[in-house]
Image: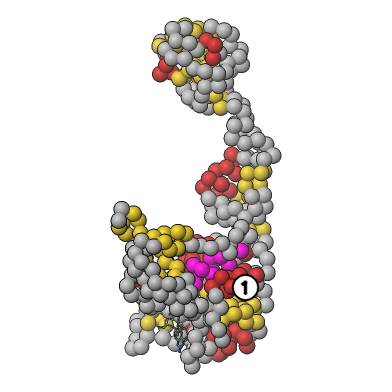
Amino acid sequence: MSLTPVAVALRALLDSVPGTTGAETLPLARCAGRVLAADVAALRTQPPFANSAMDGYAARADDLQPGKELRVIGESAAGRGFSGAVAPGETVRIFTGAPLPEGTDAILIQEHAEGVDGPVIRVTKAAGRGQFVRAAGLDFGSGEILLAAGRRLDSAALGLAAAMGHPELPVRRKPVVAILATGDELVLPGEPVGPDQIVASNSYALAALVEQAGGTALDLGIARDNHPDLAARIEAAKAANADVLITLGGASVGAHDLVQAALKAQGMDLGFWKIAMRPGKPMMMGRLGPMVALGLPGNPVSSIVCGHLFVTPLIEALLGMAEPERDRGEPAVLAVDLPANDERQDYLRSTFVTEAGERRVKPFPKQDSSMLANLARAEALVIRPVFAEPAKAGDPCRIIRLR
Ligand SMILES: Nc1nc2c(c(=O)[nH]1)N[C@H]1C(S)=C(S)[C@@H](COP(=O)(O)OP(=O)(O)OC[C@H]3O[C@@H](n4cnc5c(N)ncnc54)[C@H](O)[C@@H]3O)O[C@H]1N2
Ligand code: MOO
């Protein structure tokens, strides 16, 4: 079977998504990191009234000329404005956020007044019309759609939603991603490690990626390399109504690589298997009833790189986020020479260095897909396209930032 190009595989994966998850309404305090399920319009105008951006004096701009003396006739504070009107030659002591009194159109900051807090002040520097005045509606107007469906609710979006007057928001249900490790050799961290055994790490790594992308990880434990155990745990994913089932390991061609057969026995339609990428070649995708099934390779780095390239966009698509299929790469400059590439697109674990006066990206010399320590040290993955020509230090390249 020929290798599927990464972009083709990603497109096929996203095309297999049955739709977004449903919507639920949550109080603002529980919305951080969630994704909006509908456009959100302002319920009010902000600011609702013209107000002062500074502590000082509100007056008519015509009066705010150096040497001019103004009579202080009252005070306007935030939450407690001045009720009267201000005539020529008069001023009102004002504080940041306080409503602009009727008749005034400029603020003199108190640093430009003599006699502060006295009955009369003297202007020391001119202030023009509108100076330090925040007009009503400066930020936004009632009815304006300021947050679009598909927007991840970060701090700015949540602060804005609150300012818009929304106590709660419609958000997408978090996709449930069942994660099933496979392998006779695996033991859990902290358990005694017998001869020929290794500690299972991939489930934790993938669960973290799932949660970061906005899903809920459901750990289905470790299936041993036999059909009954695999079948029972795949049934558990179905019973949990998972949106996605990720299997880890057993994806390749060895005698103990049973995952694909086990999934097919449960009714999976195979989408693709074997991607033109390194690491991650044996990755598999299919549909198992309403579930998207993703079979990731067992090598720890392979599973995590596949997670960045496929699991994160898949979750984003289920959340209705815009452009989950976007190229995750960004431009960078190579710090070292690289040889020509073969038929698999490489994702090289790399760090940033400063060379020739610029920030450059430097792949580690060893890239074996079992080496998790250098993935944790890596700051970026350098993308080497299939059949790329040899590259020189200083050449442009594309990278995916890891942190
Ligand atoms: N003849 C061939 N052999 C292999 C090929 C191939 O094309 N022809 N592909 C290689 C590539 S590339 C990869 S990647 C691996 C992936 O194999 P599997 O997905 O079948 O993974 P396993 O054999 O189950 O495990 C590989 C390796 O990873 C360790 N592992 C597995 N699960 C975990 C886990 N949850 N936590 C930590 N480590 C795990 C496992 O012990 C093995 O050492 O196949 C190549 N072979
Ligand atoms: O794809 Mo494997 O991930 O090259 O080791």
Please say if 352 is above or below 222. Answer: above
Mark 1 crowd level (few <14, some 14–19, many ≥20, 10 Å Cα): some
Residue at the image position 56 percent from the left and 78 percent from the top: 4
Q: Nearer the viewer, residue 19 or 159?
A: 19
Q: Which quadrant would residue 374 be assigned to in this image?
A: bottom left
Q: Is residue 160 left or right of residue 358?
A: right
* Residue 165 image point, x, y percent: 63, 40
- Residue 262 pos. (x, y %): 58, 87
Residue 77 in view (yes/no)? no
Residue at image point 45% right, 68% down: 383
* Above or below 301: residue 155: above
Q: Closer to the camera, 47 or 282? A: 282
Instruction: Give residue 253's position: percent from left, percent from top.
Output: 50, 89
Residue type, mark 1 in image: Ala
Is 381 part of what is drawn in magenta?
A: no
Of helix, strand and loop, which mostly describes the magenta segment? Answer: helix
Q: Quick one: quadrant of the C terminus?
A: bottom left
**Residue 314 at what x, y percent from top left?**
58, 67
Q: Is residue 251 left or right of residue 189?
A: right
Ligand 1 falls in quadrant: bottom left
Which residue is label 1 attached to?
Answer: 12
Residue 121, placed above or below residue 193: above
Which residue: 52% across, 90% down? 226
Quadrant where the N terminus sits is: bottom right
Observer-nearest of 299 and 11: 11
Per the rendered image, the range of residues in magenta is 305-317
Q: How is the image coloured?
A: secondary structure
The answer to if 306 sits in the magenta stretch is yes
Q: Please name the residue shown 67% across and 74% down the image.
A: 290
Residue 234, quarter of picture: bottom right
**Towards the viewer: 350 or 266:** 350
